[in-house]
Image (spheres, helix red, strand yellow):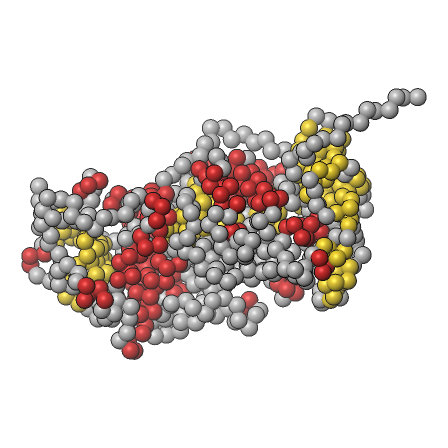
Amino acid sequence: MCPPTPSRPLRDLPPPPGVTLVDGGAELCVYAGHADAVDVCLFDEGDAAGTTERRIPLTERAHGFWFGDLPGVGPGQRYAVRARGAWHPESGLRHNGAKLLLDPYARAIEGRVSWRPEVFGHEVGVQLTGDVDLRDDRDSAAYVPRCVVVDGRFDWEDDAPLHQPLAESLIYEVHVRNLTMRLPGVPEALRGTYAGLAHPATIEHLTRLGVTAVELLPVHAFTSEPQLVARGLENHWGYNTLGFFAPHAGYAVAEDPQGVLDEFKGMVKLLHRAGIEVLLDVVYNHTCEQGAVGGTLSWRGLDNRAYYRLDERGHDIDVTGCGNTLDLRHPVVCRMVLDSLRYWVQECHVDGFRFDLAVALARGRSDDYDPNHPFLVALRTDPVLSRVKNIAEPWDIGIHGWRTGQFPPPFSEWNDRYRDTVRAFWLADLGRDNQTQTGHGVHDLATRLAGSEDLFGARDRGPIASVNFIAAHDGFTAKDLTTYDSKHNEANGEGNRDGTGHNASWNHGVEGRTDDEATERTRRRSVRNLLGTLLTSTGVPMINAGDEIGRSQQGNNNAYCQDNPLSWFDWDLRDWQRDLLDTTRFLTRLRATHPVLRQRLYFSGRAVHEDGSSDLAWFDVHGAAMTAQAWADPATRTLSMLLDGAPIGDASLLVLLHGGAHDVEVTLPVPPGLTAYELLWDSAWERPRAPEAVDPSTGPATVTAASMRVYRAIDPT
């Protein structure tokens, strides 16, 4: 008779959450603070029905974590967990041992959610509606994905963080699939994938455009909402997270989970080799489980009361518009988010993050936004996370949810004030101007052009705290901003009720496409105005991918469920699109060539030279310094901004913006020491031209209605 195997002494502290590979197998740790028991469920590869399930109880417990050894478990093992405990919805507890749950720390996820009644922890009918207080005891294993153990080792060669300064950055917000689904030069098998994004044809487009960082729409594993599936649609954008540590398998050429992870890492390595950083749009504000009416896939079944914000009746507090809100006040949830962020930086080599609905991550005990929230403090003081790019979307839909300019350093923020002001000047005000002769003047526009110091000037944040943009994934494309007054989201199946109704757009007199060349010519100039303003403004520019080729979504400003040609870029470019692409490339080169457009610190606006000239000066249509009356006049529609490049060894640039509906005679300013200019770019040009010498002493220049120009000052010495 063999002697009994000595048991391991009970541990004071739990191991790291998730699966850790050890000699002879693995160990698993999962948080289920209110559960009575937790089992690990092992499955054979290919067993979607769950017929090979083998359950192993986790027998050790500390601080709400359940953990144990899994002898013989290694890479490739499919697994999940089950948690048994109280079903007390009124107290926020929704344990249900019949529901197979994903490990929140799973590095790979295989399979899809089949939205059937068995997936819900409560009783629902075939329409997936029912009584949220009655527990459903049907097994969900055949209808939910599996976690997969993977090997984290990867040959990174000499890959290292690029640490591109924000002042030098040009961010390109892009969807993995949309960019390459029809991109010539990318093999068909690679289109719409991580490998396709890193293909030489894709990288050539990005580098010729001057992109220094791609900001990828969510690549964490996600699933579609049951409502979408019922309408025959799928979630395309990915803001519906199923796993915070696993790359979305649907974006990979590889079909095995290990290959998916390696393909993602390979994409990062190749983009880095081309000098392009990788930023991830991350959704830590909610999960795909929706509210109490939603499915039980992971967090809800493990510890609903810990992971989600609930009121005193056990109901979800929703400040995201997606049914639930993760509760980062809880240390386990805060740790999960921080661990996830560190994983993507340290193990996958990404360079930073854009935090979706970031205000929701920092709501404190009073449910109001707290800039000293433990999560923000932890991130700011973390030796890894504080050194990467962190960009906040500074709002959510809760009370007092608009917080632009209120995030602490080192956060940068999407600047919606910049977006709205630039759109108003070039589009909405012009549309009204043709009817009522009203407008907003140029005071706020000048503030945005100079880096939005009113929003980001505190705590030495500087203009790099402002991520400037005129279009993004949610909303009209730049082309559609000039083509539609109203959204046209009928294809989404929600009766055109979804998507914002406030677009500050202008259709130039005709809704939608038209064969009228004069209208289309004016629209094209408006697109160039938007891009020209973006790329000559102080701050960090972000281009909405496809705007450089005039991409349209046919007026759909919320194409979150359109994984089809409506969203995929059409690379069969017409002449005007090639001209626009050349124009955008010219503007990005102009920005890269002139440091005066890429300031790390704000302009002083005060005299910096002995002759009394300042580092930033503003002039009116007559070439005279702007007066208080001109700044305050809502009818002022012409403004010149002179940026002094001498202190940083650069040429001085004059950016002239005329937002009037008619041509105007403009006198160029002649401050001390300046005698001549070169016209580098005019938005009235369909494509870039050679520079033109300009002598301001010869009199005013005729500037086309609703157009802008960039001049370089000629040094007489």
The image position of residue 439, as x and y in percent, is 28, 71
Task: Determine which quarter of the picture holds residue 165.
Answer: top left
Which residue is at the front of the view, 609 or 212?
A: 609
Please determine whether, in this image, residue 400 is positioned above or below residue 21.
below
Residue at 52%, 68% (x, y): give it.
498
Q: Which residue sits furthest right?
A: 1
Please determine whether, in this image, residue 695 is positioned above or below residue 208.
below
Left or right of 67, for residue 338: left
Which residue is at the front of the view, 376 or 140?
A: 376
Q: Quadrant of the N terminus?
A: top right
Q: Is residue 691 visible?
A: no
Task: Determine which quarter of the picture holds residue 210.
Answer: top left
Q: How many numbered circles does the render carry?
A: 0
Q: Which residue sits furthest left?
A: 697
Residue at 16%, 51% (x, y): give it.
678
Which residue is at the front of the view, 659 or 200?
A: 659
The image position of residue 255, as x and y in percent, is 63, 43
Please determine whether, in this image, residue 66 is positioned above or below residue 134.
above
Task: Determine which quarter of the picture holds residue 2.
Answer: top right
The image position of residue 113, as x and y in percent, is 68, 54
Residue at 51%, 57% (x, y): give it.
368
Q: Is residue 151 visible?
A: yes
The image position of residue 493, as x and y in percent, is 57, 69
Q: Which residue sits furthest front?
A: 366
Residue at 38%, 39% (x, y): give it.
164
Which residue is at the front of the view, 588 or 102?
A: 102
Left or right of 232, for residue 654: left
Q: Quadrant of the C terminus?
A: top left
